[in-house]
């Protein structure tokens, strides 16, 4: 299982659908994708993690990096995740306080803070 | 000796293999199914950290993983050669090593958040992270 990435636009939001495993090997691909989106002017990102089977601290680092980038443009980075084993990693590291985490893409797209 | 030993080139693409092997041996040893996700994540973090330390230290030696099945516990040891590099590597790697330290700290934070029984030790080669999980259910009455 490798990492799969696809993007689509809904209004002013860009949805990044991530599937597979985000680890020390695959995280650079996700980083490249997020950097590219921000460089292309997409500052409101929704990262859909429903298809993610595995996430480690390298992946968390990439998401935090993405958040820093969009914030530099007054943008936002929201996560969609319902999987307990993935949410647990955000909780352990205190990142549930840093990222808005939503139950569905629709909810994340509708959210305005 | 360990139940299963694994040595792999310090490259990110092999960390997944270490996770899969560790989870398979842990399952066989009787580690609770509900805890296998934690085993997988913790060993991945320890291996990623070791790979980072080897790469930033310019070390060509492999990362070592020992999976040890005991009577009522299952232990995983992940060893690196980073301390050896610290003694012989001089000052040239200083800057790069600092960056790797930051990332490895995040990995250690995840490991200590996940695993109740974790020790950060050193052996003849370098650093050693030892993580232990119970393999038998705790008795209701002791």
Image (spheres, rainbow, N blue to C red):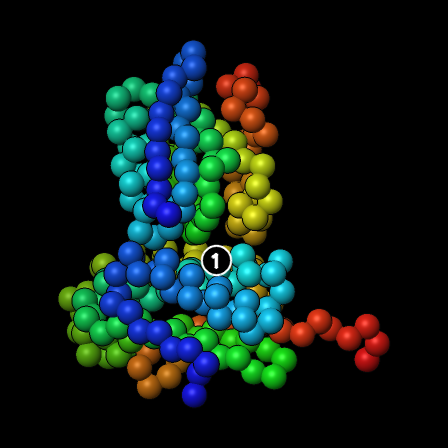
Q: Which residue is drawn at 26% across and 79% down?
A: B84
- Percent across and percent down for residue B16 are 37, 58
- Percent across and percent down for residue A44 are 41, 22
**Quadrant containing the C terminus of chain A in the rendered view:** top right
Residue farthest to the right? B141
Is residue B47 visible from the viewing direction of this image?
yes
Q: Residue at x 56, y 83 (%)?
A: B70
Residue farthest to the top? A11
Q: Give the camera-side residue of B67 and A87.
A: B67
Q: Give the camera-side residue of B32 and B55.
A: B32
Q: Residue at x 27, y 36 (%)?
A: A32
- State how many labels appear: 1
Q: In this view, does A43 lie to the left or right of A99?
A: left
Q: Is residue B138 left or right of residue A24?
A: right
Q: Which image quarter: residue B137?
A: bottom right
Is residue A74 visible from the viewing direction of this image?
no
- Percent across and percent down for residue A75 are 41, 23
* Residue A22 against residue A32 in the figure, above or below: below
Residue farthest to the front? B28
Q: In this view, does A6 lie to the left or right of A99?
A: left
Secondary structure of the residue carrying tag 1 is: helix
Q: Which image quarter: residue B27?
A: bottom right
Instruction: Say which chain tag 1 marks.
Output: B
* Residue A27 against residue A109 in the figure, above or below: below
Q: Give the camera-side residue of B43 and B30.
A: B30
Q: Name the residue under label 1.
A: B41
Circle 1 packing at 10 Å, graded few (<14), some (14-19), many (20+), is many
- Percent across and percent down for residue B21 are 42, 66
Q: Which residue is drawn at 58% across and 37% down?
A: A82
């Amino acid at each position: 299982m490798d990492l799969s990435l696809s993007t689509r636009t809904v209004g002013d939001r860009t949805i990044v659908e991530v599937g597979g495993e985000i680890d020390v090997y695959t995280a650079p691909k996700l980083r490249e994708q997020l950097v590219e989106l921000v460089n292309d002017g997409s500052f409101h990102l929704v990262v859909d993690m429903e298809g993610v089977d595995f996430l480690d601290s390298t992946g968390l680092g990439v998401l935090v990096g993405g958040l820093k980038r969009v914030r530099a443009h007054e943008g936002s980075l929201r996560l969609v995740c319902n999987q307990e084993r993935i949410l647990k990693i955000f909780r352990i590291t205190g990142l549930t306080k840093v990222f808005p985490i939503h139950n569905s893409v629709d909810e994340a797209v509708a959210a305005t803070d | 000796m360990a139940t299963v030993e694994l040595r792999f080139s310090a490259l990110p693409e092999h960390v997944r293999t270490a996770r899969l092997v560790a989870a398979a041996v842990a399952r066989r040893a009787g580690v609770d199914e509900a805890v296998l996700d934690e085993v997988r994540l913790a060993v991945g973090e320890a291996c990623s950290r070791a790979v980072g330390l080897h790469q930033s230290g310019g070390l060509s030696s492999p990362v070592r993983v020992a999976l040890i099945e005991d009577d009522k516990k299952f232990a995983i040891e992940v060893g690196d050669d980073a301390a050896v590099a610290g003694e012989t590597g001089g000052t040239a790697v200083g800057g790069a090593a600092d960056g790797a330290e930051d990332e490895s700290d995040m990995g250690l934070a995840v490991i200590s958040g996940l695993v109740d029984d974790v020790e950060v030790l050193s052996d003849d080669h370098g650093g050693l992270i030892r993580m232990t999980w119970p393999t038998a259910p705790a008795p209701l009455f002791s």
